[in-house]
Image: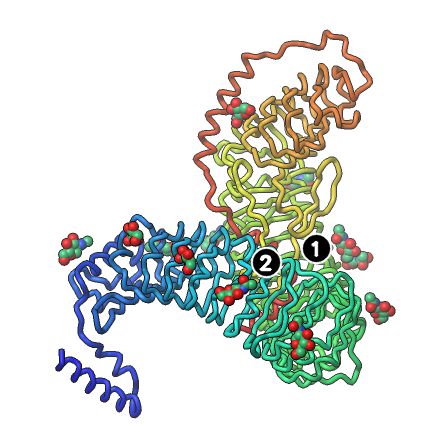
């Protein structure tokens, strides 16, 4: 023991010398030799074997573990130099792909663990309450996994804990009082979970807390003032929750150390509390979406906060005007967002702060901000939704770092300067949509990845200079008057372009095969005069989710091959000259992810087989993932493009934009020449909201199993040759607000269910045999004809066997992609800024 210590002292002295002269690494490479304890090695080995899929990749840490070697030498394991106990388990970034099961007693054997780091390990399931037995634990780091359920109350036993980090999982439940016992905590990070409820009112016991981040959760109620009384607190991040009040704070006991205060994106309202002006150490302040209820705001509150580098006071709902000269007093502002407040500035304004990101969206600005001329650090500029007219000044493009620019929704008419004004610039994303830009189309630099120029007055052929922008990921030229054909040189985009929207122009000719990028996720060429066949090469677009070619002159058969695209969710062929059968015995379409199919107003013919809809699993059991808050911020910057579709719902057509239609599941086959019976398998599509089969030649009776479509809101069967009775079961469909049976051969009494009786009589007209309210024809009593019950039963049996087929197509986890892309159209300037700012 003695000699060991002496040796250690020598080693340490040597280390010190080495450190001074050379490198600390030398020291780290010769730790005191300790064999790990048998029981701990077995426990670790058991832990490893809980994750049979881990370690497949050669670079995984557990891959290097060997059962017959000293576990203290294993990757990711650190032993206590004195006792030899395993003190640290650090498998950061390993693909463990499993759950931390509480059944496992490895935790009992590793009870001397001081540091447990399992961030980004692809773990899921509940956090085991046995974690609370690791009483020596100081660091629990589990960020970026998929944990569900609540934080175990037993964590309240970890009296030594200084860091509790479980960010970016799917935790639910409350912030439990037991956590207040963890008086040694310096950092709590639970950002991006689904935690809810109120925070405990007295959080003062966390008296050493420096970092508290519970942003992007569902917490509500008041923000406890006790948080502000914790003298050590440096970063307080509560943004994007549902907090609705903040108590006015008394005098601070000591000068506050607070550097970060993020309260944005909550439901806070009323006056902005004056105590904020005393937080003079703040460098980051986010009060966005604070609703001052059209009251006045004293912006001089912020004047004292001289150290601010980040200020987001967008969307305050105030009558007051923000005078930008306020910010001439700041010296280190790097991000400033004033969007959706009224802003004024003089033409001589000069800001000394080197601003990187400036958001002035919807600020009632009518003059181009000349003060930007000296802002040579600017990389992100959002001045969308203002009333700026005239040309974009040429000097803007000499700002060396300018990368993201959003001019959308103004009245710009063009770009000042020579044709090559952009050439020296490194701009990557440019949004000029919804202005009055006209030809010539600007010559943009090759650094462009995102170009949105929709809703302008560009005309003539699509300039082939666009094809030189070989890095483009998004190209949106919708709602202009481009004519001619889709350029063949779009083949330059063959591997990168994922969004191509050319909707509502005057494009004609065939869609060139080579112009289809294999990376396409969204393709919209609707409302043009394109003709010929759909490009066959679409089948190579394995990421395609949205395809809209409505309102063209495509003359082709149904694109059966697209059923092989695994992610296709929306298919719109409406109003073209598609023809032939919708059914091919060789390749019956089973679009497993399809949510919306609109093939109306074409020339399709033939009957649909009874089992036609078996396998459309998204419509039969898909679960819509609501657009919840945190998803808005998954690494998406400003992709200001919108999907749009014209849909017939409840009898009228209208254009739906952005996310407004994506929540629906819709089948529209109206206006074709389909014949035969309505396929009974349609009753499998339990998630269907809108069904339009009107204007065809369907025969037979309305299947009573329609009553299984419990989410149906709109049903149009008009203008067919349907016969028999209207099934009374339809009256049970409580969401079915609109239906139309007119122009058929239906007969018998109209069922008395409430849903049916609220319909206008026009929904039943032109059916010679129908009687009863709301029609004026009174039933004579002879209409009570009997149905052919045997036939019905037989068909129900068949349906049951298709259910088996449908089950075989059980969808995987709902593909979040479309949500992501709809979110992409959500404009949040704060995030736009932060994107580059912190990376
Ligand atoms: C673990 O999951 C990740 C992501 O889901 C996957 O990429 C990886 O291949 C999986 N590892 C194993 C060994 O299955
Ligand atoms: C690991 O080795 C121990 C003995 O050293 C043995 O008891 C145990 O079964 C081994 N485990 C595995 C998974 O090989
Ligand atoms: C945790 O501690 C409790 C009580 O001390 C004990 O009953 C339990 O078995 C322990 N769990 C594990 C996994 O060691
Ligand atoms: C927290 O501390 C209080 C009082 O010190 C004690 O009664 C309670 O059991 C503790 N809770 C937990 C979960 O440790
Ligand atoms: C909050 O807790 C602290 C210590 O835990 C105590 O000193 C203080 O009086 C409490 N305050 C309130 C309002 O309960
Ligand atoms: C804070 O302190 C000032 C004087 O330092 C005093 O006038 C004021 O009333 C105090 N406010 C509260 C809420 O205690
Ligand atoms: C917006 O600006 C115009 C002048 O450019 C002004 O007349 C109008 O009052 C402003 N609106 C608001 C709400 O400040
Ligand atoms: C189509 O584009 C023109 C401009 O070229 C625009 O005026 C019109 O509103 C657009 N139509 C739709 C439905 O967006
Ligand atoms: C669109 O361009 C065509 C010529 O290519 C022209 O005839 C037409 O009038 C233009 N339409 C509009 C709305 O400018
Ligand atoms: C799809 O891609 C493959 C490989 O690049 C190519 O050989 C094939 O011709 C493409 N298919 C179509 C229909 O373009
Ligand atoms: C579609 O194309 C075929 C062959 O090119 C042609 O015979 C037919 O008339 C076209 N249909 C329409 C409606 O234009
Ligand atoms: C339709 O619902 C009824 C009960 O409402 C059920 O007996 C029948 O099996 C269902 N049919 C299908 C195809 O789901």
Look at the image and tell me whether residue 379 can be seen: no
Q: Quadrant of ligand 6?
A: bottom right
Q: Residue at x 72, y 15 (%)?
A: 749
Numbered tag placed on residue 241 in the rendering: 2
Marks 2/1: CA–CA distance: 46 Å
Disc 1 secondary structure class: strand
Quarter of the figure with residue 724: top right
Quarter of the figure with residue 721: top right
User: In the picture shown, does residue 398 fall above or below 429?
Assistant: below
Question: What residue did someone put label 1 on?
Answer: 507
Q: Residue at x 38, y 65 (%)?
A: 161
In the image, 454: left or right of 777?
left
Q: Residue at x 31, y 56 (%)?
A: 54
In the image, 709: left or right of 109?
right
Number of residues whose C-alpha sits closer than 10 Å to that of mark 2, classed few (under 14), some (14–19) or many (20 or more): many
Mark closer to the chain start, 2 or 1: 2
User: In the picture shown, does residue 666 fall above or below 727?
Assistant: below
Number of residues whose C-alpha sits closer than 10 Å to that of mark 1, classed few (under 14), some (14–19) or many (20 or more): many
Q: Residue at x 72, y 55 (%)?
A: 505
Residue 190 x, y percent position in the rendering: 48, 61
The quadrant of the picture occupied by the N terminus is: bottom left
Residue 646 x, y percent position in the rendering: 70, 45
In front: 78, or 158?
A: 158
Residue 311 x, y percent position in the rendering: 64, 73
């Amino acid at each position: 023991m003695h000699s060991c210590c002496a040796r250690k002292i020598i080693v340490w002295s040597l280390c010190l010398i080495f450190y001074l002269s050379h490198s600390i690494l030398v020291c780290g490479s010769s730790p005191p030799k300790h064999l790990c304890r048998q029981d701990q090695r077995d426990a670790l080995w058991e832990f490893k074997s809980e994750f049979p899929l881990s370690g497949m990749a050669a670079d995984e840490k557990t891959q290097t573990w060997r059962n017959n070697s000293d576990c203290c030498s294993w990757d990711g394991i650190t032993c206590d130099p004195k006792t030899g106990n395993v003190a640290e388990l650090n498998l950061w970034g390993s693909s463990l792909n499993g759950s931390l099961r509480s059944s496992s007693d490895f935790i009992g054997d590793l009870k001397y663990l001081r540091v447990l780091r399992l961030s980004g390990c692809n773990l899921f399931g509940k956090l085991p309450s046995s974690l609370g037995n690791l009483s020596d634990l100081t660091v629990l780091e589990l960020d970026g996994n998929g944990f569900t359920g609540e934080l175990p109350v037993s964590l309240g036993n970890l009296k030594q804990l200084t860091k509790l980090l479980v960010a970016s999982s799917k935790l639910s439940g409350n912030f439990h009082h037991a956590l207040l016992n963890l008086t040694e905590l310096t950092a709590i990070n639970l950002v991006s979970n689904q935690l809810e409820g109120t925070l405990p009112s007295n959080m003062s016991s966390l008296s050493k807390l420096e970092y508290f981040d519970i942003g992007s959760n569902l917490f509500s109620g008041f923000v406890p003032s006790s948080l502000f009384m914790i003298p050590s607190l440096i970063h307080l991040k509560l943004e994007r929750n549902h907090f609705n009040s903040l108590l006015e704070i008394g005098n601070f006991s000591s000068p506050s150390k607070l550097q970060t205060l993020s309260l944005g994106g909550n439901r806070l309202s009323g006056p902005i509390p004056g105590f904020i002006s005393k937080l003079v150490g703040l460098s980051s302040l986010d009060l966005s979406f604070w609703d001052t209820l059209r009251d006045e705001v004293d912006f001089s509150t912020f004047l004292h906060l001289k150290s601010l580098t980040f200020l987001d006071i967008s969307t305050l709902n105030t009558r007051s005007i923000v005078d930008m000269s306020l910010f001439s007093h700041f010296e280190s502002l790097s991000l400033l967002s004033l969007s959706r407040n009224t802003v004024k500035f003089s033409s001589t304004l000069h800001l000394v702060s080197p601003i990187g990101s400036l958001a002035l969206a919807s600020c009632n600005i009518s003059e181009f901000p000349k003060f930007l001329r000296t802002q040579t650090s600017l990389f992100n500029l959002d001045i969308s939704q203002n009333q700026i007219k005239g040309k974009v000044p040429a000097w803007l493009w000499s700002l060396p770092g300018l990368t993201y620019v959003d001019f959308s929704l103004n009245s710009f008419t063009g770009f000042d300067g020579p044709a090559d004004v952009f050439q020296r610039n490194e701009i990557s994303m440019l949004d000029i949509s919804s202005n009055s830009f006209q030809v010539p189309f600007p010559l943009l630099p090759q650094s462009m990845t995102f170009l949105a120029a929709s809703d302008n007055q560009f005309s003539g052929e699509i300039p082939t200079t666009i094809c030189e922008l070989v890095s483009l990921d998004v190209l949106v030229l919708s709602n202009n008057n481009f004519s001619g054909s889709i350029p063949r040189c779009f083949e330059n985009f063959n591997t990168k372009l994922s969004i191509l929207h050319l909707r509502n122009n005057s494009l004609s000719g065939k869609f060139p095969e080579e112009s289809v990028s294999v990376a396409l996720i969204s393709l919209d060429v609707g409302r043009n005069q394109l003709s010929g066949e759909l490009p066959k090469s679409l089948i190579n677009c394995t990421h395609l989710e949205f395809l809209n070619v409505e309102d063209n002159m495509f003359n082709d058969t149904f694109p059966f091959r697209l059923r092989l695209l695994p992610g296709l969710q929306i298919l719109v062929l409406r109003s073209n000259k598609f023809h032939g059968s919708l059914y091919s015995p060789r390749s019956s379409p089973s679009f497993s992810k399809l949510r919306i199919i609109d093939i109306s107003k074409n020339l399709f013919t033939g009957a649909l087989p009874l089992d036609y809809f078996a396998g459309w699993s998204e419509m039969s059991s898909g679960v819509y993932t609501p657009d919840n808050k945190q998803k808005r911020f998954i690494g998406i910057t400003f992709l200001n493009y919108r999907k749009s579709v014209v849909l017939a719902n409840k009898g009228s057509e209208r254009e739906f934009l952005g996310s407004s239609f994506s929540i629906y599941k819709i089948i529209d086959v109206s206006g074709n020449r389909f014949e035969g019976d309505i396929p009974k398998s349609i009753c499998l599509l339990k998630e269907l909201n809108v069904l339009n089969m009107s204007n065809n030649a369907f025969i037979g009776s309305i299947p009573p199993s329609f009553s299984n479509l419990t989410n149906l809101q709109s049903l149009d069967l008009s203008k067919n040759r349907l016969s028999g009775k209207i099934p009374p079961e339809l009256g049970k469909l409580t969401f079915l607000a609109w239906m139309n049976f007119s122009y058929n051969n239906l007969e018998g009494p109209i069922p008395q269910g409430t849903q049916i009786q609220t319909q206008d009589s026009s929904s039943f007209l032109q059916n010679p045999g129908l009687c009863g309210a709301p029609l004026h024809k009174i039933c004579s009593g002879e209409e009570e004809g009997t149905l052919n019950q045997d036939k019905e039963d037989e068909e129900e049996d068949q349906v049951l066997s298709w259910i088996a087929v449908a089950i075989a197509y059980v969808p995987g986890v709902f593909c979040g992609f479309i949500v992501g892309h709809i979110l992409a159209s959500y404009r949040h300037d704060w995030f736009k800024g932060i994107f580059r700012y912190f990376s």
